[in-house]
Image (cartoon, helix red, strand yellow):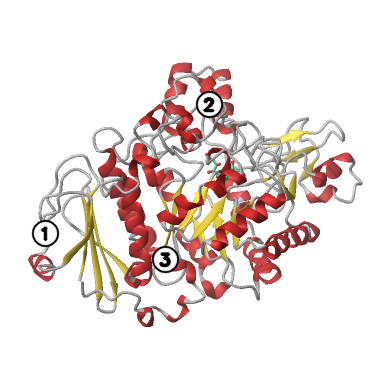
């Protein structure tokens, strides 16, 4: 292969500071990763037991979903003590042990930072609600009733109004998510500095950065104005008023100065639902000193029709078009986070691929086109095994607050139960939350007890131990992709250019860094397709080496592609 390996001299000068450009992040949802004490809920010691899986996969960073003390109204995204570990997951000393074990293997660990809201059991909120005169009253958003009801017309992300009346004072408080998740008032400097103190405390303890939950919602439009009500709707669209508020970027720059300046190789990634490409550049342009990168939601919203629970299959090309828009938009300034799934999304092989006939091919094709884009890839637990959506049939199987609230309000509003379940079966967050499938023993090796949510029955054949060492497996394919990013600077630092291959089902793109060129060509459909490429282009690739594929791989770049076939060429 003529492609230079470890030619760090070729890479852009900022590559040292931006170490995360050649890193791969792995997300752990602790509840469902590995149980160590038989209570059916994953925990920190369980994670330590499985670190060799991650080392084998080759990931650089672990993002840990919340493990702080929490009443678990939203599985830990409702935090009642930011400086304590929830007893379900272990203790602070288990956390120190995990950090030590992660660092010992040369990996880093970032925590989930959930500071748009706290739990309603957090001492800050308990004080705040206690009286109108309490010094912490202003730490949350309290308002008088309007016409005896909610202060404005915003809807919660989890169904129903975004306001709940508190009997103690008769006032309403704002919660963009569940009533147990009151929104903090970031306009109060005491709130911001309390958060920064807590963040420094974790960094001092050894964590390597944060994934910041709904961080684009922390600054709200003053006055909290009503949203526009679409025809036939009960609630107004508050989104334009509670996202991208006027002081958002000021707060992120302040956080950067107060928390991150002068510290070593950290990673900050913001979760930013609804973000546009222009806003994304503002967050992640290094010159602006805000965040390293953000999660955008374009490709995970494409299949929403009327809200997420009325969804559709994408047509060939839609996914590739969305990825291309983001690659092009952040080519000059800013940086992409690349992901197919997380704990809020269905399993990608079921959603975007073909989890029956072309399960292996589609899982590996999707992974390849994701990992070889410009940006930092994120692997969500189980994705590296090609885990699929779970065939839950009954509402009693589901555990997620968003799913259960949607079901209850839909039925109250007169929806057909069978129809409602169909919507949930396509999109519920619980698809991502069934236990990781380690082996073919009871409950997939996740627990010796009763798991808090049922295991996907396909664990008997779909599990990690069946895939280790099998060159054709989804796991080994992910491993190869991660290895490519580490070895070839063009993967991390090269430019991206999409090529028209004559059919929307084909996603073809080149990555270029100086003399090094990669060409990725994938058929993202379940039928055969032949790429139509310029003769000149085809000639230039004669003799190019196929460095990774998931099929029989005809050497010519314009050879017909089987369903979900992908090939990666280098020269
Ligand atoms: O999610 C925020 C978000 O906007 C969504 O993806 C949302 O959870 C939902 O799926 C909309 O349909 C973050 C966390 O990732 C999520 O798990 C939490 O429930 C939420 O914030 C509140 O903290």
Q: Tag count in the figure?
A: 3
Splitting the image into 4 quarters, where does residue 8 fall?
bottom left
Q: Quadrant of residue 310?
A: top left
Rendering quadrant holding ligand 1:
top right
Q: CA distance from mark 1 to mark 3?
A: 32 Å
Label disc, if present, on residue 330 of the rendered structure? 3
Of the residues tagged 1 and 2, which is closer to the observer?
1
Say which residue label 2 marks. 398
- Of circles 1 and 3, the one toward us is 1
Dividing the picture into quadrants, the one containing residue 13 is bottom left
Which is in the foreground here, disc 2 or disc 3?
2
Count neighbours of disc 3 (C-alpha within 10 A) and say few if under 14, some if 14 to 19, many if 20 or more.
Answer: some
Is 200 drawn above or below residue 406 in the view shown? below
Q: Could you tell me residue 515's position as x and y percent?
A: 25, 78
Label pair 1/2, CB-CB below 8 angstroms: no
- First in residue order: circle 2 vs circle 3: 3
């Amino acid at each position: 292969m003529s492609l230079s390996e470890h030619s760090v001299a070729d890479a852009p000068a900022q590559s040292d500071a931006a170490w995360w450009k050649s890193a791969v992040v792995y997300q752990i949802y602790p509840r469902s990763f590995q149980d160590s004490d038989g209570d059916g809920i994953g925990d920190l010691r369980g994670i330590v037991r499985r670190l060799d899986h991650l080392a084998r996969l080759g990931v650089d960073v672990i993002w840990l979903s919340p493990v702080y003390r929490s009443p678990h109204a939203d599985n830990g995204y409702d935090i009642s003590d930011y400086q304590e570990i929830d007893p379900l997951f272990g203790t602070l000393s288990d956390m120190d042990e995990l950090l030590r074990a992660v660092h010992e293997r040369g990996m880093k660990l970032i925590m989930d930072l959930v500071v748009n809201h706290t739990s309603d059991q957090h001492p800050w909120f308990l004080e705040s609600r206690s009286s109108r005169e309490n010094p912490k009253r202003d730490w949350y958003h309290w308002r008088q009733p309007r016409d005896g009801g909610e202060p404005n017309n915003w809807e919660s992300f989890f169904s129903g109004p975004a306001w709940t009346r508190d009997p103690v004072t008769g006032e309403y408080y704002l919660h963009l998510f569940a009533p147990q998740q009151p929104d903090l008032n970031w306009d109060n400097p005491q709130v911001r500095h309390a958060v920064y103190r807590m963040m420094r405390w974790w960094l001092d303890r050894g964590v390597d950065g944060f994934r910041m939950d709904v961080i684009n919602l922390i600054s709200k439009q003053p006055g909290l104005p009503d949203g526009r009500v679409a025809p036939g709707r009960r609630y107004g669209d508050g989104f334009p008023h509670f996202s991208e508020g006027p002081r958002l970027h000021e707060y992120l720059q302040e956080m950067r100065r107060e928390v991150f300046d002068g510290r070593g190789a950290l990673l900050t990634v913001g979760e930013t639902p609804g973000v546009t490409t222009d806003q994304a550049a503002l967050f992640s342009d290094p010159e602006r000193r805000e965040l390293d990168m953000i999660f955008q939601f374009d490709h995970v919203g494409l299949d929403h029709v009327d809200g997420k629970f009325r969804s559709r299959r994408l047509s060939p090309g839609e996914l590739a078009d969305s990825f291309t828009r983001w690659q092009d938009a952040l080519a000059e300034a800013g940086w992409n986070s690349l992901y197919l799934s997380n704990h809020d999304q269905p399993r990608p092989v079921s959603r975007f691929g073909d989890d029956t006939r072309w399960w292996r091919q589609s899982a590996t094709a999707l992974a390849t086109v994701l990992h070889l884009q410009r940006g930092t890839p994120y692997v969500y637990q189980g994705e590296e095994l090609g885990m699929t959506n779970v065939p839950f049939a009954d509402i009693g199987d589901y555990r997620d607050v968003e799913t259960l609230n949607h079901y209850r309000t839909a039925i109250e509003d007169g929806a057909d139960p069978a129809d409602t379940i169909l919507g949930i079966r396509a999109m519920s967050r619980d698809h991502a939350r069934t236990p990781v499938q380690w082996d073919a023993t009871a409950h997939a090796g996740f627990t010796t007890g009763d798991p808090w949510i049922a295991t996907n029955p396909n664990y008997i054949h779909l599990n990690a131990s069946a895939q280790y060492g099998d060159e054709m497996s989804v796991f080994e394919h992910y491993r190869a992709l991660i290895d490519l990013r580490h070895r070839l600077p063009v993967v991390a630092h090269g430019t991206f250019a999409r090529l028209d291959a004559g059919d929307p089902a084909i996603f073809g793109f080149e990555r270029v860094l100086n003399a090094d060129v990669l060409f990725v060509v994938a058929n993202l459909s379940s039928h055969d397709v032949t790429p139509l490429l310029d003769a000149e282009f085809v000639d230039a690739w004669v003799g190019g080496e196929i460095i990774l594929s998931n099929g029989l791989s005809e050497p010519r770049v314009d050879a017909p592609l089987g369903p979900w076939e992908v090939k990666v060429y280098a020269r």
